[in-house]
Image: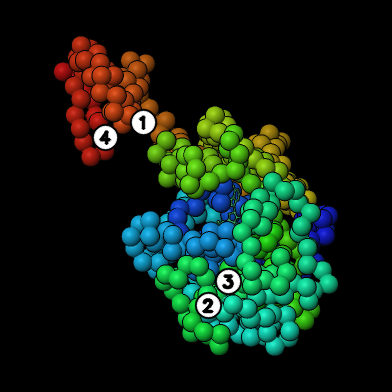
Amino acid sequence: MYLYNSASRRKEEIIPHEAGKISMYTCGPTVYHFAHIGNLRTYIMEDVLEKSLRYAGYDVKRVMNITDVGHLSSDADTGEDKMLKGAKREKKTVMEIAQFYTDAFFADCKKLNIKKPDVVEPATNCIAEFIQMVEGLLDGGYAYIAGGNVYFDTSKLKDYYVFNNFDAEDLAIGVRDSVSEDENKRNKTDFVLWFTKSKFEDQELKWDSPWGIGYPGWHIECSAISLKHNGEYLDIHCGGIDNAFPHHTNEIAQSEAYLGHAWCKYWFHVMHLNTSNGKMSKSKGEFLTVSLLEEKGYNPLAYRFFCLQSHYRKSQEFSYEALSNAEAAFNKLLARVGALKEDGEVDETVFAEYTKKFNEVLGNDLNTSLAVTSVYDVLKADTNDATKLALINDFDKVLSLDLAQQAKKLSEKKDEAPANEEDAEIDALVAQRTQARKDKNWAEADRIRDELNARGIVLTDTPEGVKWSRK
Ligand code: AMP
Ligand code: ZN
């Protein structure tokens, strides 16, 4: 399998530290709010990567942290802890916020068929490990204490800027960070390993440490959690592109300084999902969540399909129009899958030929759009339906679009479809009236009710929505 490695800036064959096994680490969500669909694009692509590696026969162990402390509003250790901000916003405790948004994150993942990593570790579970690592860095001369905080000394490294050649826009957070400088830092790029002093003294979660009562920096979490569960050598580290600098750069600095040897070989970064106004945000513009897409009537798996259609190393622009087109294409694909019949024996030669090709497109830097095309190729193949179904189910181990089940659901829906055109029109009017009421457009809702009334239609409200019947 070949992947683009952001550390070497070229496509490389994956050769794991231990033959046949892959250790993989994913930066998890900061659980102060819902994930937006941009965050989830990154998790979908990482999920496809994990499943492709399994498909190729590797024994994968994937670890993910949950950031429930230490991620400040700016990635350069300034501003208030995001968790505390979330707690204040909702007048709850930090731990209540963390639990609620961790659950919400995994509920979204489930809807998008993103598998839960083998290990999920909240940062607040690992304070002892962080302290141990910070002590090691101080002992080794890689860290210093200033103004009550412990800092990593980036001048002690030969090579600090591993990921610093991305363009400024991709690294917007890292760039923005230079605005407010911490005067305790000896070098501009130094970062906090442990805080006991900050401008925000109302930090809710604090722990005792050799340097006083305080809390860990954000970067140390990922290094220590990966070390705890994946050992001293990590094969693949994943994250969205904004994590490359400073977060991943700092992870490499402190992990290698602590271990005394090279740490992670392959770095997998997913480019951003943007809106036509630029970067997606939780605070500006429409807050795009999976629940919002569902409220608007989209199938979450149509969003997964939309993501698979573009390459993870290209930014993707989101619009409802593009999502609707993806959903229409997805439904057409499902209709074709639904028309396949179990008609005999699977042709093993054809099966082997197509699975080999599927593996190849994934193995070529995770070409997900060609992986989706493989399903269309199977549908067109000169073989029986049983072989086609077997192949589609096999590909779905990676694509995770629930193709067979969704196709069945879609055909059942069709069976419930209106018997004639007049009924279809009434269904549409009832739906329009429901939407008008949702939009608080009472005049339009009344107009539609009157029109239906004139046609002899009675409306009844039920827990499943509005039902209609003839007088
Ligand atoms: P956070 O919860 O902010 O720590 O981010 C969770 C993940 O989403 C990280 O891997 C980020 O790099 C990634 N991410 C943030 N914004 C976007 C975006 N617009 N598109 C894709 N991934 C993103
Ligand atoms: Zn991380």
* Residue 440 in view (yes/no): yes
Residue nearest the viewer, comparing 340 with 54: 54
The three-letter code of the residue at mark 4 reads Gly
Give amino acid for label 1: Glu
Image mark for residue 211 = none
- Residue at disc 4, CB closer than 8 Å to ligand 1: no
The residue beneath circle 3 is 217
Identify the mark nearer the N-term, 3 or 4: 3
Q: Earlier in the sequence, mark 1 or mark 3?
A: 3
How far is disc 2 from disc 1 in space, using C-alphas?
A: 63 Å
Q: Which residue is mark 1?
A: 416
The Cα–Cα distance between marks 2 and 3, rounded to whole angstroms, is 10 Å
Say what secondary structure mark 2 lies in: loop
**Residue 196, disc:** 2
Secondary structure of residue under mark 4 = strand
The x, y position of residue 321, in whole percent, is 54, 29
Image position, residue 392 (x, y; %): 62, 45
Is 370 on the left or on the right of 321, as rendered?
A: right
Residue 455: give x, y in percent of width and height. Answer: 23, 12
Q: Earlier in the sequence, mark 2 or mark 4?
A: 2
State the CA–CA distance, disc 3 to disc 4. Answer: 49 Å
Snapshot colouring: rainbow
Which amino acid, by three-letter code, is at mark 2?
Thr
Residue where numbered disc 4 is placed: 465
